[in-house]
Image: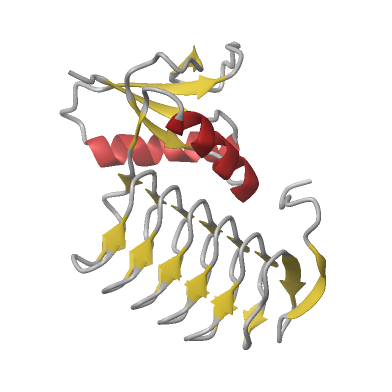
């Protein structure tokens, strides 16, 4: 019987995710929760234990970092281990019964996931983001706080939609693409680029596959 649930990553987003995990589990749970990292260390700010990663651990796990490329790399490690990928959903989020949330998802407080939307594995939605009807979000992508994704939009793998960005309905955002904070997207954006502004324009290639410097 599995009685432990780990969050892979102990940074700022990991701290937020621990609160979401506790909301997801509720007060009556017997699960032991812990951060999972490559090297154990002491952090007085954390009120949860820290465990070293091992492929032999048997537990539920959610990847708890906000960088899409790292989410993808960490997912690959989990797939080679005995850990079981699971989603965490805040009790203060709305998720339609007709939406599909695949394993490893994170849905933060006050998010909205509408009917027939589909989140592939390892997708993270941060606080108060909106995913409209029939939206498809690819594996390991991150939708940041208060972003609004219009109905029927298709977002590729390992993409990042910045805080407060708005994406018009029915568009396509490519794999490994970054949409900057506060951008308004009126047209399709290709793979592997960084786009921002109102209207959003491609500024350069996303050669480093990195959101946070």
Q: Nearer the viewer, residue 208 or 31?
A: 208
- Up/down of 81 relative to 187, above or below: above
In the rendered image of this protein, does residue 122 appear above or below residue 31? below
State the quadrant of the N terminus.
top left
Name the spot of residue 116 as percent of width and height, x first: 28, 73
Give the image quarter of residue 61.
Answer: top left
Q: How many marks?
A: 0
Looking at the picture, the colour scheme in use is: secondary structure
List the single residue furthest toward the front.
Answer: 80
Which residue is located at x 48 percent, y 86 percent? 169
Q: Position of residue 10 (x, y in %)?
A: 55, 28
Camera-side residue of 7 and 187: 187
Which residue, as the protein is rendered here, is positioned at the far right? 204
Q: Residue at x 57, y 16 (%)?
A: 44
Q: Residue 29 or 209: which is nearer the viewer?
A: 209
- Residue 175 figure quarter: bottom right
Q: Position of residue 186 (x, y in %)?
A: 62, 88
Q: Which residue is pictured at 44% across the width and 33% down the height?
A: 79
Residue 83 screen position, x and y as percent = 37, 25
Q: To which quarter of the image does residue 176 belong?
A: bottom right
Q: Tell me if residue 62 comes above or below residue 181 in the rendering.
A: above
Instruction: Tell me which residue sits at (24%, 35%) in the image.
Output: 25
- 85 vs 209: above or below: above
Q: Is residue 144 left or right of residue 119?
A: right
């Amino acid at each position: 019987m599995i009685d432990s649930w780990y969050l892979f990553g102990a940074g700022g987003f990991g701290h937020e995710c621990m609160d979401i995990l506790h909301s997801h589990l509720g007060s009556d749970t017997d699960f032991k929760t812990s951060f999972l990292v490559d090297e154990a260390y002491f952090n007085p700010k954390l009120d949860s234990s820290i465990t070293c990663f091992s492929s032999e651990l048997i537990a539920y796990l959610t990847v708890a970092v906000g960088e899409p490329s790292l989410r993808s790399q960490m997912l690959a490690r989990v797939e080679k281990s005995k850990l079981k990928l699971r989603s965490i959903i805040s009790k203060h989020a709305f998720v339609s019964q007709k939406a599909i949330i695949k394993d490893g998802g994170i849905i933060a407080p006050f998010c909205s996931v509408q009917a027939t939307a589909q989140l592939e594995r390892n997708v993270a939605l941060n606080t108060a983001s909106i995913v409209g009807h029939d939206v498809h979000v690819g594996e390991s992508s991150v939708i940041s706080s208060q972003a609004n994704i219009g109905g029927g939009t298709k977002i590729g793998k390992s993409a990042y939609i910045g805080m407060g960005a708005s994406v018009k309905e029915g568009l396509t955002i490519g794999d490994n693409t970054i949409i900057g904070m506060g951008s308004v997207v009126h047209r399709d954006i290709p793979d592997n680029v960084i786009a921002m502004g109102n209207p959003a324009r491609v500024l350069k290639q996303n050669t480093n596959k990195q959101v946070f410097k």
